Image (cartoon, rainbow, N blue to C red):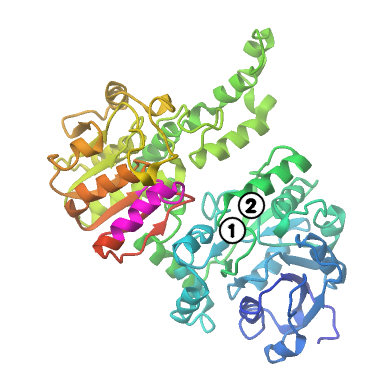
Amino acid sequence: MSTGRPELSLIVISYEMARELPRTLYSLSPRYQQGIAADDYEVIVIDNGSTHPPRLEDFADLGMNLQIHCFPDPKPSPVRAINHGLSLAAAPLVGVNIDGARLASPGLLDACRRAARTDADAVVTTLSFQLGPGPQWITIQQGYDAVWEDRLLDTIDWRNNGYRLFEISPFAENITRGWFGPLNESNLIVMQQGLWQALGGFDPAFESPGGGAANSDLLRRALEHPGTRQVTVLGEGVFHQIHGGTHTNAASLDVYKNAAREYYRLRGRIRVVDAERSYFGPVSRAAAEAYRRQLAAGHAAPSEAATVMRASPDARSRYLSLLKSVLLNETGLETEVALDSLRGMTQVPPAFWSDILYDVPGKLGLALEEKRRVRAMGFDTLSGDPGRSLGYTMIGRKRLDHLEWCVTTALDEGVAGDLMECGVWRGGACLLMKAILDLSGDQDRNLWLADSFAGLPPPSQPEDQGLDLSREHFPSLAVSRERVERAFADFGLLDARVRFLPGFFADTLAGCAVEQLAVLRLDGDLYSSTMQALEALYDRVSPGGFIVIDDYGGLGQCAQAVDAFRAARGITSPITMIDWTGAFWRKS
């Protein structure tokens, strides 16, 4: 160990990571990290109760300034262990990696310390990625496991070129708006020792397994501390290995719900700080090239593809960005928030008209911020009941961004066929597809809208029992053809190439006039509806065409139908998750 004082102390929390921690420490070692010497930093591993804790001698060959401590009072939450590690840090600059299963990119540590030098009160945040084909809490339900991940890592020789990790890692779920959006947490955060002390470290009141929302809370408190400034490191990141973790690899939404309840109890409403921030580079050639390949192959986070497009000055990008905001009702959320404030009142107070309605950001800014976050994910912002959104779609920003990429790619690559959605609700996804067709100047393709326009059928197959989404129970899901046509007319998108197929799928799809499809989007929710659409239409999808499943991660009945159909047909093209529920594959 070095006798001099290091410039950076890095706290790493470990729990039952015999497979993952050695790789993580290798990625933090001087053998791998670039631009920083061994004496410049120390790594302090705090083991939080592993059955077989890591031993210092096992990592002697890494040549790093390393300490390993076993926390004497381990709890399901790592928060107290983190704070213990903070008390041991010797450097003036301290970083915390709450999860020892995260590999670092080669220039991460040097970039973090240099970013911290730009401002005495810098809160240095880093971006998070997850190894594998998609969000791990979803992909593990599809067979993604440690063996798969080990093979994946072996294919890129990451130890000799760590920037190739970008090739096999989409953005983590906490990256909702790409490289330049706000973060709801940072899985490796770096600040001056004095700022850590002023904040009191992590709040030990967060006792949920894995810490719950303690990481988000720490970032929010740091960014709201007087005088601080967020500096986000670009071109670097941390890459999560699968290990059965409490949150990232949790297959049950109950984990997230329990963490959210704890946060609401301790802090009230969850908030993401979207203040002015700086960005620190440079982005290495290797990272930029890997990321370019992701975009070209469609493997980068769909939201990031749209972020790049929205940054472009051309009118096409601006139009599509505005169209998505309107389809999601992101432009009308202030009115929703104002109306929400009247809930429970028997009469409208006079101040509502003169004050609240026209100053929502000032009076109800926190509620508006939360509503925007929820709408961007496609969730209802009114009551928590499905299907009651005031927008034209419930599929969220990521799925809209991804649909744009699918249609644009199909057009650019000349994939033959029309575009089609089965289950259109108020028509938002179809409106976007038609707008892209019109912008491209394509006059040959049709857009098909298949829907009963009277709601979903009641469950008729054993797989759908217990999931009754019919008009009797969910009248808001029954949107008439006339209303959808009126929406197309309102947007100036209604013409003869917009083709309607009214009726239940069992009665309309098999004999429909659709010949070839370049993009097929299924949003039928039920096992029966999904299977009927696949059986009737899959053979009409052209090679290279896209099959998009809206509810693959959200409704077990839908996923069961997709898996059964793919197995019966011997389809091996991998399914890639778009967000928490949407999925797609390309026909080989």
Tell me the quarter of the image containing the C terminus: bottom left
Residue 428 visible in the snapshot? yes
Residue 98's tag is none
Asked if 425 appears above or below 536 in the picture, the reply is above
Q: Is residue 98 magenta?
A: no
For the residues bearing labels 2 and 1, Cβ distance under 8 angstroms: yes
Tell me the quarter of the image containing the N terminus: bottom right
Q: Residue 102's spot in the image, x, y percent? A: 62, 70
Which of 417 and 160 lies nearest the eye of the viewer? Answer: 417
The stretch of residues the image draws in magenta is: 549-566
Q: Residue 442's spot in the image, x, y percent? A: 18, 43
Q: Is residue 300 left or right of residue 77?
A: left
Q: Please report the residue visible at 34 percent of the width from the left and 38 percent of the height from the top.
A: 429
Q: Residue 554's spot in the image, x, y percent? A: 46, 47
Asked if 544 appears above or below 114 in the picture, the reply is above
Q: CA distance from mark 2 to mark 1?
A: 7 Å
Q: Is residue 562 magenta?
A: yes
Asked if 345 appears above or below 4 in the picture, the reply is above
Question: Badge 1 is on which residue?
Answer: 250
Q: Earlier in the sequence, mark 2 or mark 1?
A: 1
Q: Amino acid at mark 1?
A: Ala
Q: Is residue 217 left or right of residue 130?
A: right
Residue 255's tag is 2
Q: Please report the residue visible at 83 percent of the width from the left and 53 percent of the height from the top.
A: 199
